[in-house]
Structures are given as C-alpha cells and as structure tokens.
Amino acid sequence: MRVEQATQDDYSTLIQIWEASVRATHDFLQEGDIERLRPMILDQYFDAVDLRCAKSDAGEIRGFCGVHEGNIEMLFVAPQARGSGIGRLLTEEAIGQQGATRVDVNEQNEQAVGFYKRMRFRVTGRSPLDGQGKPYPLLHMTLSEDP
C-alpha cells in the first residue's frame, strides 16, 4: 500500500468510496443529506484540500484523506478495506507529511471517534451543528502529544 497525491482523474473513484463509506458508517444521515453532499464534495471539497489516496500495489484506490490548514477534513476508506490499516496509514501521512493536528468528527459516528482516539486525538470541544448547519453534532479533536 502506498500513499499518493490524488488527481482529478481519481475523483470519480473517490466519490464512489466516499458514498460507500458514508452509507456504511453514517447511518444517522438521511438520503437527502447524502444527495446534497455528493456534488459539493465532488465539485468543491476535493479541490479545497491537500488530497491524498492510498493505493494498492495494483494501483486500486482503497481510501483517501484531505487536509486543509492542519485539519483533517475528510478520511474515508472503502468498506471492503476497513480494518486493514488504511485509515491509520492515511492519518499518519496527514500528521507527518501534511501537518494535521485537528479533526472534527460527527459525534454519532462512534467508530470514527474511537479510531481518532486510538490515533492520539482528544476531544477539545463540541458543536451542536455540522458544517452545513444540520443537527449532527461535531466533536472537535486535537492531536495529543501524549503517547
């Protein structure tokens, strides 16, 4: 597995991974939320972040991570690749190479909250609404120096 800079040629695969991952982990979202988010992510959000993807030796994208100004804005792993260390690989890249020290996580996504805690992020705040003003609370997490 290797991490590479994502290109616009990768976007169609990335949005498929995003949707499959969201459907597997974000059961609190409504179908309309997913439909509204998909074009925003594809047309705006991918271009707004330093976007890296994890590729298998055969060149298949298995996950991706986007960082902006020290914040992990997106981290998604293909459902069939979950548990294989790809999220850890991308998060370590985000911290070590992209300068990430913060992440906002949907409070209802307990798996993601637990993952970031294992990656040494600690909850430092909470917002009752998500970035689109929807009632999906966010936990603000910051990388801890403690091992």
Image (cartoon, helix red, strand yellow):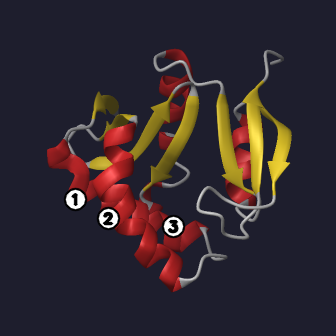
Q: Residues within 10 Å of mark 3 (few under 14, many from 20)?
A: some
The C terminus: image quadrant: top right
Which amino acid lies under the numbered mark 1 shown in the image of this protein?
Ser
* Whole-number angstrom distance, CA of label 3 to CA of label 1: 15 Å
Which residue is label 2 attached to? Answer: 16
* Whole-number angstrom distance, CA of label 2 to CA of label 3: 10 Å
Q: Residue at x 41, y 77 (%)?
A: 35
Which residue is label 1 attached to? Answer: 12
The N terminus: image quadrant: top left
Image x and y of residue 27, in percent: 63, 76
Which disc number belongs to residue 22? Answer: 3
Which disc number belongs to residue 144? Answer: none
- Seen from the viewer's position, the closer of residues 92 and 58 is 92
Image x and y of residue 134, in percent: 66, 69
- Seen from the viewer's position, the closer of residues 94 and 135 is 135
* Whole-number angstrom distance, CA of label 1 to CA of label 2: 6 Å
Q: Residue at x 56, y 51 (%)?
A: 83
